[in-house]
Amino acid sequence: MSIPTLYCCWICAVCGFVYDEAAGLPEEGIAPGTRWADVPETWGCPECAAVKSEFEMVRVSDAA
Amino acid sequence: MSRPVVILGSGLAGYAVARELRKIDSQVPIVLVTENGGEFYSKPTLSNALALKRAPEVIATSSAAQMAVQLNVSIRVRTAARRIDPHKHCVMLEHEPLEYGKLVLAVGAQPIRPPGSGLAQGVHSVNTLDDYRRFRASLAGCGRVVILGAGFIGCEFANDLCAAGLEVDVVDQAPHPLQRFWPAPLANAFERRLAGVGVRWHLGRGISAIRREAGRTAVELDDGSVLHADIVLSALGLSPRVELAREAGLRLGRGIVVDAHLCSSEPSIYALGDCAEVQGQVLPFVMPIMHCGRALARTLVGKPTAVAYPPMPVALKTPACPVVFLPAPPRGQGDWSVEGNADDFIALYRRADGELAGAVLLGSAVGRRDEFVRRIGARQAVYG
């Protein structure tokens, strides 16, 4: 029996870019499934360079 | 009672100014006027929403009402500004004047359309959330899309629609997509990789005619060939919306001309975003808007702050071939050098004196974006 993993999405309040934990950002070296807390604190929004503290959690989605 | 700061436009630019201003002044009345519904959403999201499985309903992340509460601003939705009276410091709305202390024009740009064709011919352009909802609704049941224009928006939509299972043809007069932004080896690699996921390119081709025929749209190219589309997406570029500014007598270039403090030729009227020409450039991207919003907020509270653009990467969100552009400022000449291979290209743009002025990173090289931002370093603002 598998337990579904809950991944979150985090949205940049400045420009609306969405970081999806399930998808990660492989092109920036952030593997799929990387939790928001594990995204480096030095990371900035790829769209507008906003810092992590400008992001808000949007929704929780179920992912297998 | 102090007159409000009035902001025309509820896109990223309008909301950036409202947000940044509220961070440093909790008291000044702010009125935001928008022709559309005023939802906060990320326009860059529109061209990769299908691949991210984001339905139109979730793209607007806050309603106008939520933004009004969150930012403590007044928002007038579905309200057009008819005319600006710079002498009376007043904007004429549909039926009433709205007086301003300071006026910020964040009215954006309008899509350049192919002459003589619109929704009646099945030709969509997408520059607002309303456009996007209409486009997605019309996409249902379509098998083949023809995209006019191989710029940023055309290329991103091409990848997104291919990933969603549609047949995609892209037409552009230029020999390469994003012709002005990179040297040929990178353009070629990009074309190959997108062709690899199904995009059909028709480059170096103009459009002769667009006709609605037998329930489809026939796009005739200048070589006589005809592409039969179920739907056409026009992505031919953006033209700054300058009509209000023109009628108010403001100085115009390609956009509303503003100085380093984002002030127009009329004191008390400012502009930023896709409608504005800052340092001689109209930069319809996210990072310039953020820098302008922060500087303008300070100027509006009486601490004049010039905009000084650092290197501002622009990401091309095409998963088949990610690209990051760091365009050089259009001052002076330079030359490209290219390194890399099919998966991982870097193009460097150097001035005659060897200074690194710009770069393009393609494929896995996009992970080195921050390194190149540092190498290119701070640019000089024209105004010093």
Image (spheres, coloured by chain):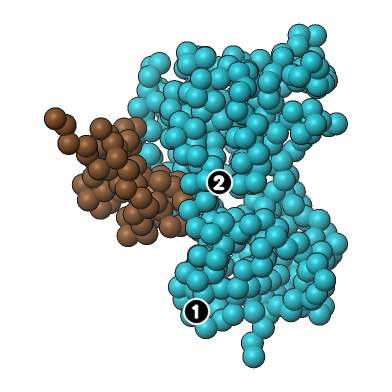
**Point 22% across, 39% down: residue:** A5
Rendered view: B156 above or below B103: above
- Residue B91 visible to an observer of this rendering: yes
Amino acid type, residue under disc 1 in the picture? Asp
Name the N-terminal-most of marks 2 and 1. 1
Chain for numbered disc 2: B
Q: Which mark is residue B25?
A: 1
**Point 82% across, 64% down: residue:** B82
Q: Which mark is residue B43?
A: 2
Chain drawn in brown: A
Which secondary structure, mark 2?
helix
Q: Position of residue B202 (x, y in %)?
A: 66, 15
Chain drawn in cyan: B
Residue in the foreground of this view, choosing between B119 and B150: B119
Q: Quadrant of the N terminus of chain B?
A: bottom right
Residue in the foreground of this view, choosing between B317 and B344: B317
Residue in the foreground of this view, choosing between B345 and B123: B123
Q: Are marks 2 and 1 in contact (CB under 8 Å)?
A: no
Rendered view: B195 above or below B320: above
Answer few, some or many: residues within 10 Å of disc 1's Cα (few below 14, many 20 plus, some between 14 and 19): some
Q: Is residue B170 left or right of residue B123?
A: left
